[in-house]
Image (spheres, grey):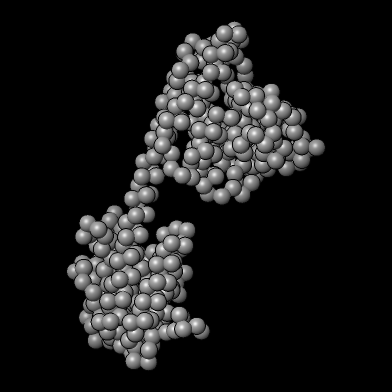
Amino acid sequence: MTPDQAPAGANGTLSDEQRLRALLRILRAINQARDLRSLLWLLARETSQSLGAERSTVFLFDPDRRELWSFVAEGLSEQIWFDVGHGLAGHVFRTAKTLIVNDVADDDRFNPEIDRKTGFVTRSALTVPIINSRGVTIGVFQAVNKAGGAFDTSDAEFLEAVAGEAAITIENVQLYDGRRRMFESLIAALADSIEARDPLTAGHSRNVMRYVSGMADMMRLDSDDRRAVECAALLHDYGKIGVPDDILRKPGALTEAESALMRSHVDQTTRILSGIEFEEGLRDVPLFAAQHHERLDGSGYPGGISGEAISLGGRMIAVADVFEALTALRHYRKPMLPEAAFAAIARESGSAFDPMVVNALGRHLASEGVLSEEFVEEALK
């Protein structure tokens, strides 16, 4: 064990140096964590190690159920739920005050029911409130069973500092999640607004996104790339807002002028999406959407680009877009069976379409039972 990882002293208190090192580890953990749950797991482990506690738990408040629940709990595989009117954690949540109890058996506020359910034996507990920037208590942080001594005010000050960092992080994540949900709902509303113009093709963009999502599973895309290509798939046809209804719904072949106007929806999509300030992980959305009519051999539009010059997102949406269009009813033709549509795409794999992407679509369709694995293998030969 390195000095930086040294446990609390024999008398159960943390030295100033130990406390500083522990808090620095926690700050590093905040910067390195990928998500809220992994961060709070790190905080719980650091707390137990720094205080010499047997285990630590972060309880969050669920306003709909009026209950506290164990968002992270060392030593437990199942969530704990209980009414805020019960237990030491419930008392701290209601009062928003730190509580030190070094013999829970002598404290009427202790709720033994959880120990009976889990088989754990709680002897002592240090519990502090998690309070956000608006002064609202959103949960509690609890450390139990300190080895070699009793919890004291020094421990409480340390855990209050940790809970303060947890509160900031939880609030930031909740704000980010709220903004993300609002953004995604607005994007969905934009897609729905363009598809509402033609009931026959309604659902096209969502279906393309669904295929893209399945392909992303097969290709093991990371979360940022996945979100970006899914968002672009949902918005890839938004530029059709500038195409007249009589062209969108025309039952027969388009004239050369009408075709040019229809193709212009790609430039319109690019122009509109480029005016949206996407967050860092989604900044390629306009590019992906702009390239869904490009083809691997350079025969597509609007840029006539080819090969690796086409983004992976653009290549994925191109394949998903064609498969969805072929298998859906259109004003000018009946839908193809999935087998015929995939076979048509497979024949152009390596010329118009990226073989890796076509393969991913085939494996996704097979995993969904739309096509058989044998059919996909044969079509890709």
Name the foreground residue: 256 vs 115: 256
Q: Where is residue 86 in the image (x, y as percent from the top left)?
A: 25, 71
* Displayed quadrant of residue 137: bottom left
Q: In percent of the image, x 25 and y 58: which residue is there?
A: 133
Answer with left or right where residue 304 lies relative to residue 173: right
Q: Nearer the viewer, residue 212 or 376?
A: 212
The residue drawn where x is 54% and y is 33% is: 287
The residue depicted at 42 percent of the width and 84 percent of the height is 7
Q: In this view, does 380 lie above or below 7?
A: above
- View extreme (right): residue: 381
Q: Quadrant of the image for the C terminus?
A: top right
Please provide percent x and percent y for residue 24.
Answer: 40, 71
Say which quarter of the image contains residue 187. Answer: top left
Relative to residue 41, is residue 321 depicted above or below? above
**Residue 251 in view here:** no
Whole-percent x, y for residue 93 in the image? 24, 67
For residue 332, above or below residue 185:
above
The image position of residue 257, as x and y in percent, is 57, 8
Left or right of 97? Residue 329 is: right
Which residue is farthest front? 17
**Residue in the picture at 68% in, 30% down:** 306
Residue 46 seen in this snapshot: yes
Residue 68, quarter of picture: bottom left
Q: In this view, does 243 lie above or below 176?
A: above
